[in-house]
Image (cartoon, rainbow, N blue to C red):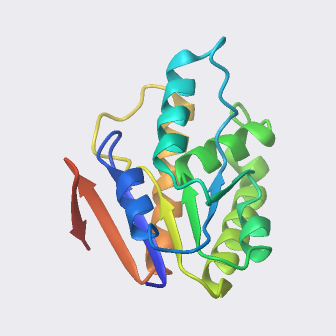
């Protein structure tokens, strides 16, 4: 299967489709860069995380990390990354960069993306990544929203170019690009 990027809008079926691609694998490393679920502070996020966990086979190993490149390099099995948009958000948070001029931290973004791409391409097993498609809605009135859309769009383009297959999910239907 190689490298597969699954993109689409919110609730388009991306994660379920990506999980189904690896359903027959004996071992899968599930990499999630999302924030830990805390039902007390964010019950809606906790419910989403619970739904994802409930769907996954019990033998899949879950690792919560924003170091996707390092985790990919250290894994000797197929991998599912869910999701690249969350990784980007968490990375910008970790760099404390939302309010900083992009030129001040461009090198961090470029380095992190290149490290992810290198690990993506060098991983000897199937890797499936879920991402969000951006740019089909209104342009954000906030600089941080425009920056996020720009950077995720660039990230998606680079990952797509390094992938064997790119799947756009629309209303639960996969469209191979």
> What residue is drawn where x is 68% and y is 35%?
35
User: On the rendered structure, is 5 left or right of 147?
Assistant: left
Residue 37 figure quarter: top right
Quadrant of the rendering where the C terminus is positioned: bottom left
Residue 39 figure quarter: top right
**Relative image position of residue 98 (x, y in whole percent):** 69, 34
In the depicted structure, whether residue 25 falls above or below residue 172:
below
> What residue is drawn where x is 32% and y is 67%?
167
**Observer-nearest residue: 36 or 62?**
62
**Relative image position of residue 65 (x, y in whole percent):** 75, 51
**Relative image position of residue 66 (x, y in whole percent):** 73, 51
User: On the rendered structure, is 43 left or right of 6?
Assistant: right
Quadrant of the rendering where the N terminus is positioned: bottom left
In the depicted structure, whether residue 99 falls above or below residue 57:
above
**Relative image position of residue 119 (x, y in whole percent):** 69, 77
Please indicate, yes or no, whether residue 96 appears anywhere in the rendered image. yes
Residue 53 figure quarter: top right
């Amino acid at each position: 299967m190689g490298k597969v990027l699954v993109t689409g809008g919110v609730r388009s079926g991306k994660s379920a489709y990506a999980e189904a691609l690896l359903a027959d694998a004996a071992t899968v490393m599930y990499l999630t860069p999302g924030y830990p679920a805390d039902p007390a502070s964010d019950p809606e996020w906790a419910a989403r995380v619970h739904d994802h966990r409930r769907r996954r086979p019990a033998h899949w190993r879950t690792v919560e990390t924003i170091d996707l490149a390092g985790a990919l390099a250290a894994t000797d099995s197929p991998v599912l990354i869910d999701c690249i948009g969350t990784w980007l958000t968490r990375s910008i948070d970790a760099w404390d960069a939302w309010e900083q001029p992009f030129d001040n931290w461009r090198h961090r973004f470029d380095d992190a993306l290149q490290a992810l791409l290198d690990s993506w391409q060098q991983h000897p097993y199937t890797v499936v990544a879920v991402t969000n498609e951006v740019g089909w809605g209104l342009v954000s009135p906030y600089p941080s929203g425009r920056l996020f859309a720009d950077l995720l769009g660039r990230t998606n383009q680079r990952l797509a170019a390094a992938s064997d297959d790119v799947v756009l999910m629309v209303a639960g239907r996969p469209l191979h690009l």
